[in-house]
Image (tube, grey):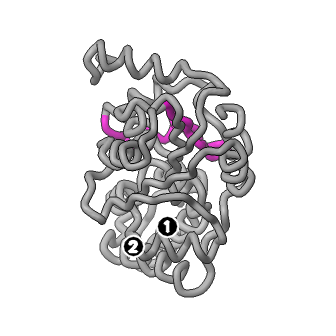
Amino acid sequence: MRSKFPPAEKAAYRAHLGKNGGMAKNVIWDMGGTLMDTYPSIDRLLLATVEQKLAETRSGGASTPAAPSLRDIALLTRGGITRAIGILAKRYGIDPGATATAHEAMKRSWQATTPPPVMAGARAALAAVRERGGLNLIVTHRDRASAELLLARAGLAIDDMICQPDGYARKPAPDMYLVMLDRHRLRPADCLTVGDRAIDALAGLRAAVAPVLLETPGVPLDEVDIATSCPEETREISYLLSSANRISDLDLVTRFL
């Protein structure tokens, strides 16, 4: 594949990807899918939506494609919920608007009643950063009111948070990371970014921060890229990210501290 990045930029990325444990002190976290285990309920919602559509189509006497598995859905959602809904709409004829509305209703229910569970290992990883005198920082696409409420309900204490709806460019633009570094006078070399998508890693790299990617067991990023036909720049980051930069459990974040 022809590189999407200029040689100098790619070399800089490789240098940051080559960092090993014991170098970072502060962690810039993603939120949904990283600190909060939001994917399982979203996956089940989308699978149920597809199955309902297929059943309605069959009841009308028309033939339908085979229903996807939960893993098939997971491969799509790990590339982005909006992208996943668009793909499922084209593939199975679900109403993307209604599906997006159902997803928003689910997020509101997290705020009003039961929040999604905290990701396994998240509390221990946050505590490990604090014990080392570091900062736990969040950059998220979620709106501030929703993010603060979810963190409060989950009992997760963080030191600062930047929310994209407050006026920042979406990832993989590095703006939120750069603002966070400047606000706390942090050196990129003293930081680590942890997220569950290639855009998290790419945004971190563009801010000169070494990334760690949290992968769902059995749902590797490389297969996500193929399933979602993701943009070239994020697909290339998948190829650059070695196994050393990928973890399947947040408990493993401590090896980078």
Q: Is residue 226 visible?
A: no
User: In the figure, 216 relative to 45: above or below?
Assistant: above
- On the picture, is 217 further left or further right than 227? right
User: In the figure, 178 relative to 244: above or below?
Assistant: below
Kindly identify the amino acid type of the residue bearing the numbered disc 2.
Thr
Q: Position of residue 116 (x, y in %)?
A: 61, 70
Q: Residues within 10 Å of mark 1 (few under 14, many from 20)?
A: many
- On the picture, is 244 further left or further right than 92? right
The residue positioned 28% from the left and 24% from the top of the image is 4
Q: Residues within 10 Å of mark 2 (few under 14, many from 20)?
A: many
* Numbered-mark total: 2
Q: Is 101 or 53 nearer to us in this picture?
A: 101
Q: Is 254 or 94 nearer to us in this picture?
A: 254
CB under 8 Å between discs 2 and 1: yes
Residue denoted by label 2: 99
Q: Position of residue 216 (x, y in %)?
A: 62, 46
Residue denoted by label 1: 46
Marks 2/1: CA–CA distance: 8 Å
Of mark 2 and mark 1, the one earlier in the sequence is 1
Residue range corresponding to the magenta coloring: 210-231
**Residue at the bottom extreme of this rendering:** 112
Q: Is 21 or 73 nearer to us in this picture?
A: 21
